[in-house]
DNA sequence: CCTGACCTTTACGCGGTCTTGACGGTCCCG
DNA sequence: CGGGACCGTCAAGACCGCGTAAAGGTCAGG
């Protein structure tokens, strides 16, 4: 679960954010001033929501202090519209800057974006691997593995498979497939599809005559079945 | 140098951004519509500035398309104040959302924040020595060893090899390789690649006719295999 | 001014890939 | 039962990308 540290001296805002964030599945820590915010950084929050204008410390000092302790994204809340404030906050190490009053949905979306970026990097080489019973598809490395060895696909074969896999089990019409792979001007050459489906099945299916993963939905199109 | 891809259909804005960003030390690529933006993603910009409301594609589709090709931060520019638009864009994969008219200083600060976040983590633990079966590559010392003795590479040869090795086994498109080695303006001279691949293979591969480490993936590019 | 290293360009053969046509099978519907 | 629409399969020729060699071109250093 994602832990958010909320730093604000206004109890009303803290309470509202605690309710909202908890309802959206976050765990919430709170701090009412800069000193306790820096102390709370030791609890390794995954994200910090920081109101500038705390009673004890200058906002920028809080940011730099937090940056010393954690790399978690910092989203600044502030009532000040002054552009120079934003610049200083962002350059001090903040990741985003939201001015009050703010739309709740937008605020939450910015939190999601911030946490997505910070966790996405951490896991580094995250491979979107798609598994079927008899083969696996690596969409980023553009490789296929089957029975331990790699399978070679021609560019067009790969393009077709990629579109089918990315659709995630949805049925794709011949028109749509042709437009995606061959470009929007070749939407009538449905024969291509059949030829390449045969080749793909021959290379990937255990029994090409009775496909289990590259299924044809008669009259509607084709579908990828993991 | 940090490379920024600016996507906007308004030539005035493109021109203004190009001047401003260049003055601040960025390298600038531009695209006037969604299709060319997706193509330009192969040039692996370090950051994307994207205007929603392009003539050819829906803005959200451009975001998801870019996300498929790159993890570079995307900063959305838009004239629309509607909060729902922001939420959709952020959830589609954008990293920040700036509404026009915007303060230039704030905009630049947000760019700095975005690029800081994405590059900050990348420089983690990197192995400067890469081993292949028949040779080793020292990325920091810029030296190659094979059979005990050093191998001399010309600057261009080295640039190409370095890009391939740094990709760590991923397939790199000709566009991308050319952009990395020769700069983003030479992305069509695919013949260079073949010539230099031959030279590299002759210098590094045990059997240049059947390369084991500098593998070509027909139709999509080249790959380094350790 | 010459030389050598390096980059760029031209030319060409080969093999893989794409396209196209032909044919058989299946299913549905008149 | 027959015809048509749709799908699967195979094979052959056209075409394009790739690998390779080798000839200009450029530039710095001696």
Image (spheres, coloured by chain):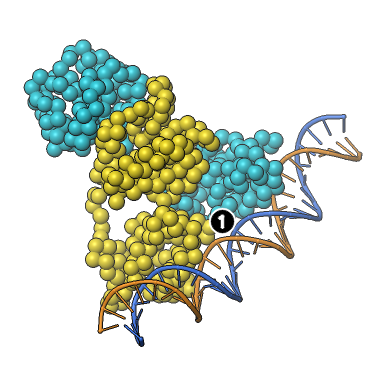
Chain colours: A cyan, B yellow, C blue, D orange
Q: How many marks?
A: 1
Q: Residue visible at 11% across and 31% down?
A: A61
Q: Is residue A101 visible?
A: yes
Q: Chain of mark 1?
A: A
Q: Residue visible at 32% across and 46% down?
A: B22
Q: Nearer the viewer, residue C13 or B2?
A: B2
Q: Residue visible at 33% across and 18% down?
A: A103
Outermost residue, top direction? A12
> Could you tell me residue B118's position as x and y percent?
29, 42
> Could you tell me residue A38's position as x and y percent?
12, 29
Relative to A13, residue B29 above or below? below
Q: Nearer the viewer, residue A204 or A12?
A: A12
Residue position marked by numbered label 1 in the rendering: A154
Image-based side of B73 in relation to C28, left or right:
left
State the quadrant of the C terminus of chain B.
Answer: bottom left
Q: Secondary structure at mark 1?
A: loop
Q: Is residue A28 visible?
A: no
> Could you tell me residue A225's position as x and y percent?
55, 40
Image-based side of A188 in relation to B191, left or right:
right
Relative to B171, residue A167 above or below? above
Q: Residue visible at 62% across and 53% down?
A: A199
Image-based side of A149 in relation to D29, left or right:
right
Residue D6 occupies quadrant: top right
Q: Nearer the viewer, residue A12 or B33?
A: B33
Q: Nearer the viewer, residue B185 or D14?
A: B185
Image-based side of B176 in relation to B112, left or right:
right
> Could you tell me residue B112's position as x and y percent?
26, 39
Relative to B163, residue D28 above or below? below
How many residues crowd mark 1 within 10 Å: few (<14), some (14–19), many (20+)? Answer: few
């Amino acid at each position: 679960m994602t832990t958010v540290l909320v730093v604000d001296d206004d109890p009303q805002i803290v309470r509202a954010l605690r309710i909202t964030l908890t309802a959206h599945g976050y765990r919430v820590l709170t701090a009412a001033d800069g000193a306790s915010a820096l102390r709370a950084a030791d609890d390794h929050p995954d994200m910090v929501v920081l109101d500038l204008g705390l009673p004890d410390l200058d906002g920028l000092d809080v940011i730099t202090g937090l940056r010393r302790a954690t790399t978690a994204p910092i989203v600044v809340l502030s009532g000040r519209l002054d552009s120079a404030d934003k610049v200083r906050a962002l350059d001090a190490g903040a990741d985003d800057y939201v001015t009050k009053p703010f739309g709740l949905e937008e605020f939450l979306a910015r939190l999601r974006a911030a946490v997505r970026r910070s966790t996405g990097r951490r896991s580094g080489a995250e491979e979107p691997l798609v598994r079927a019973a008899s083969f696996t598809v690596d969409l980023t490395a553009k490789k296929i593995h089957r029975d331990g060895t790699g399978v070679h696909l021609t560019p067009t074969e790969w393009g077709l498979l990629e579109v089918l896999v990315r659709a995630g089990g949805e049925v794709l019409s011949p028109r749509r497939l042709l437009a995606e792979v061959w470009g929007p001007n070749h939407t009538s050459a449905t024969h291509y599809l059949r030829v390449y489906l045969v080749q793909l099945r021959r290379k990937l299916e255990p029994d090409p005559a009775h496909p289990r993963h590259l299924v044809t939905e008669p009259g509607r199109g084709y579908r990828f079945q993991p």
